[in-house]
Image (cartoon, rainbow, N blue to C red):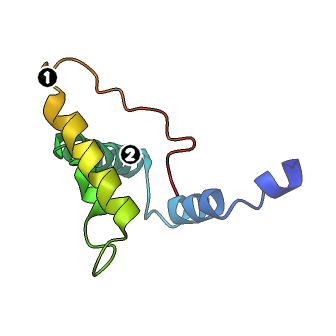
Amino acid sequence: MASWKAKDPIVRLRLYLEAQKLWDRRKEEKLQADTEAAVQAEVDAYEAFPAPNPLDMFAENYALAPRALREQRAELSELLKSKTDQDKELVLPPAEGRFP
């Protein structure tokens, strides 16, 4: 493992660029900060995305969905309609033995 650490291409490139006066600690810190900001922006965008509609899993899978899938969609739709308290977690029945 130690022999491969000495061959790390990222470290080698950084050392080369520093020797050529093309890279320094200030640029390294700026790159780190910019990268962290970009990642955080993506995380924030993902977290702001609206929650998916559970019924979407039945959409556009078949030109004409099989009867069993249509029944499952209708059952899920009824469960979602019966959910009156928005703060209450929707508990779906167990799936075992329910699918054809």
Report the residue marked by disc 2.
Answer: 32
Secondary element at tag 1: loop
Question: Residue at position x 20%, y 47% from top?
Answer: 45
Q: Which amino acid does label 1 sit on?
A: Gln
Q: Is residue 1 left or right of residue 49?
A: right
Instruction: Identify the mark at residue 86; answer none if there is no mark.
Output: 1
Q: Residue furthest bottom?
A: 63
Is residue 19 depicted above or below 99 in this figure?
Answer: below
Q: Which amino acid does label 2 sit on?
A: Gln
Visible in this render: residue 41?
Answer: no
Is residue 61 depicted above or below 23 in this figure?
Answer: below
Residue 86 in picture, x, y percent from top left: 14, 22
Q: In which quarter of the image is residue 68?
A: bottom left
Residue 71 in picture, x, y percent from top left: 32, 55
Q: In which quarter of the image is residue 80?
A: top left
Question: Residue at position x 36%, y 61% from top?
Answer: 69
Is residue 18 depicted above or below 75 in this figure?
Answer: below
Decide which of tag 1 and tag 2 comes sooner along the chain: 2
